[in-house]
Amino acid sequence: MTKISRGRCLLKVRIAEAKTTQAQLSRRTGYSQQQISNWVHNREKMSYEATVLCAFVLNCHAEDFYEWHLS
């Protein structure tokens, strides 16, 4: 059976592509700047709900926030 796992978080890339900042994303989502920084620096994984909200705000797909690995 094929398994999929999340790799490195690409939130920093998506923020740059949207021409916004971590602070602006914080204000628009309600997540703290520290929490967003934790995601950007791979200290924590984003929850599904956080991923979907950030995707909506940054106008991209939830799958775009991580590198994905199949094994």
Image (spheres, rainbow, N blue to C red):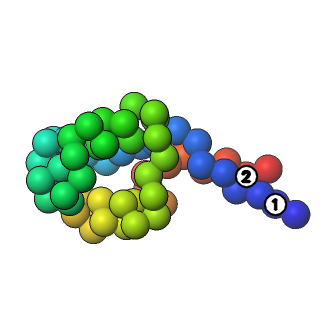
How many badges with numbers are in the image? 2
Q: Which of disc 1 and disc 2 is earlier in sequence?
A: 1
Mark 2, residue position: 70
Mark 1, residue position: 2
Do labels 2 and 1 touch, CB within 8 Å? yes
Q: Nearer the viewer, residue 61 or 30?
A: 30
Is residue 39 among the parts visible in the rendering? yes
Query: At which x and y percent is residue 8?
Result: 52, 38
Residue at x 26% of width, y 37% of height: 34
Is residue 20 among the parts visible in the rendering? no
Residue at x 70% of width, y 56% of height: 4
Checking the image for residue 23, the label placed there is none
Query: At which x and y percent is residue 28?
Result: 14, 59
Q: Which residue type does callout 2 highlight?
A: Leu
Q: Nearer the viewer, residue 14 or 40?
A: 40
For the N terminus, the quadrant is: bottom right
Q: Nearer the viewer, residue 48 or 19?
A: 48
42 over 18 or under it: above or below: above
Label 1: element kind? loop
Q: Which residue type does callout 1 highlight?
A: Thr
